[in-house]
Image (cartoon, rainbow, N blue to C red):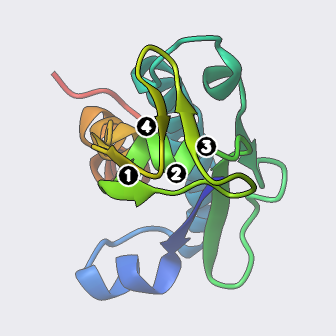
Amino acid sequence: MLKFRFRIDEKAFRQVGYDLDPARIGAALSAAAQDAARDLKKALEENTPVRTGKMKSSWKVAGTKEMLRGAGGARFTIENTQPYASAVDDGAAPRMIYPRNKRALKIPGIGFRAYANWPGFPGRMIVQKAMQQINVVNRVLNRLYWGGRRLG
């Protein structure tokens, strides 16, 4: 299971020096968080490898209705409920596999062995690719500072 929490902090934007209208900042933060969550979920689904489609269809965004101004910012959570999602994203290290209940492993095409050397596999870096693809920080800043207007 993968779970990521994002928090857009109002205080941090004020410290950076953005001169936003205090009455508008709550709505702008909520809208920016909704935009970022929607775009990030779409990018995660595009970058997820597909064999059966279970992992791709299990990306969920939590907190979209609660993205109102509260506790000095807006928050949302993106999660994948499949138990193997973190292994696909992070990869797995090589290791020795030993039998659990019997004295030997039955390996198809090879026969019985007391142990097996499993080579592991590299991670797919789904979340990293999605974050780079949509650049969440720039989208939020654009929404807050320019009011969502597209430039250029």
Check whether the beta carbons of the residues at disc 2 and disc 1 lie within 8 A of each other: yes
Residue to which mark 1 is pinned: 90
Q: Which one is earlier in the sequence, the residue at label 4 or at label 2?
A: 2
Instruction: Residue type at mark 2: give it.
Output: Ser
User: For the image shown, how many numbered marks are present on the structure?
Assistant: 4
- Circle 3 sits in a helix, a strand or a loop, which is it? loop
From the viewer's side, name the closer residue of 139 and 84. 84
Q: Residues within 10 Å of mark 2 (few under 14, many from 20)?
A: some
Does the image show residue 134?
yes
Foreground mark, 3 or 4, reads 3
Residue 86 screen position, x and y as percent = 52, 51
- Rounded to the nearest whole Å, what is the CA distance between mark 1 and mark 4? 34 Å
Q: Which one is earlier in the sequence, the residue at label 1 or at label 3?
A: 3
Q: Which one is earlier in the sequence, the residue at label 3 or at label 4?
A: 3
Foreground mark, 1 or 4, reads 1
- Rounded to the nearest whole Å, what is the CA distance between mark 3 and mark 4? 37 Å
Write the residue at 64% across / 11% down.
52
Residue to which mark 4 is pinned: 148
- Rounded to the nearest whole Å, what is the CA distance between mark 4 and mark 2? 34 Å
Residue 11 screen position, x and y as percent = 46, 86
- Rounded to the nearest whole Å, what is the CA distance between mark 2 and mark 1? 6 Å
From the viewer's side, name the closer residue of 96 and 66. 96
Residue to which mark 2 is pinned: 86
Determine whether, in the image, residue 12 is placed left or right of residue 40.
left
- When the figure is inspected, residue 55 is found, relative to residue 79, above or below; the finding is above
Residue 12 screen position, x and y as percent = 38, 83
- Circle 2 sits in a helix, a strand or a loop, which is it? helix
- Rounded to the nearest whole Å, what is the CA distance between mark 2 and mark 3? 6 Å
Instruction: Residue type at mark 1: give it.
Output: Asp
Does the image show residue 147?
no
Q: Residue furthest right?
A: 65
